[in-house]
Image: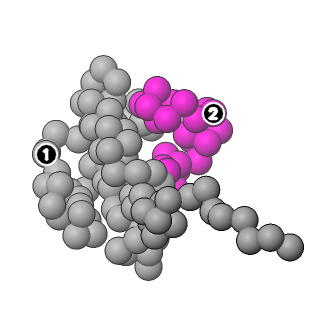
Amino acid sequence: MPNIPSTKTAAAISQKRELIPRFRVLLHNDDVNTPEHVVKALMHVFKFTVQECERIMMEAHNQGVALCTIEPLEQAEHHRDQLRTGGQGQIGAEEMDKEKTRRGERATRGQPDTMNTKERSDII
């Protein structure tokens, strides 16, 4: 059998496929927003079903925090920012420190949060 040369370049062969780090978007319970407002905001931001949004809202209410989704950083930050504004109204008034989030520290209560699952897979 003849030796068939590879069509890949040396650079392509030496490249390793790296996965994009993914971050958790967490919803913290608060005493400011109504359950209905939270469900509407989740439906608007994530396009989840009413049942899924109610489940997330109830988990945050009962447990203090709920996982909304896990996604790349830019998308997670975008969704976090959308949740903060609630589409139209405000969900949480304080600005979260992005560096704390990247280190895996908990955001201010009542704030959506992003957390790197690669660094802190033991959380939640």
Q: Residue furthest right?
A: 1
The magenta region covers 41-69
Q: Horizontal and vertical percent for residue 59? A: 51, 56
Work out whether 9 lies above or below 119.
above
List the residue tagged with mark 1. 95
The residue wearing badge 2 is 49
- Give me the C-alpha separation between circle 2 and circle 1: 28 Å
Q: Is residue 110 left or right of residue 54?
A: left
Looking at the image, residue 28 lies above or below residue 11: above
Q: Residue 56, image x and y in percent?
A: 53, 48
For disc 2, the neighbor class at 10 Å (few under 14, some 14 to 19, many from 20) is few
> Compared to 45, does 20 lie above or below?
below
Residue at point 65%, 38% (across, down): 51
Which of the pair 2/39 is nearer the observer? 2
Residue 110 counted in the magenta span? no
Q: Residue at the spot x=27%, y=37% of the render?
A: 81
Q: Secondary structure at mark 2?
A: loop
Residue 29 lies, in percent from the top left, at 36, 52
Amino acid on which the number 1 mark rests in the picture: Glu
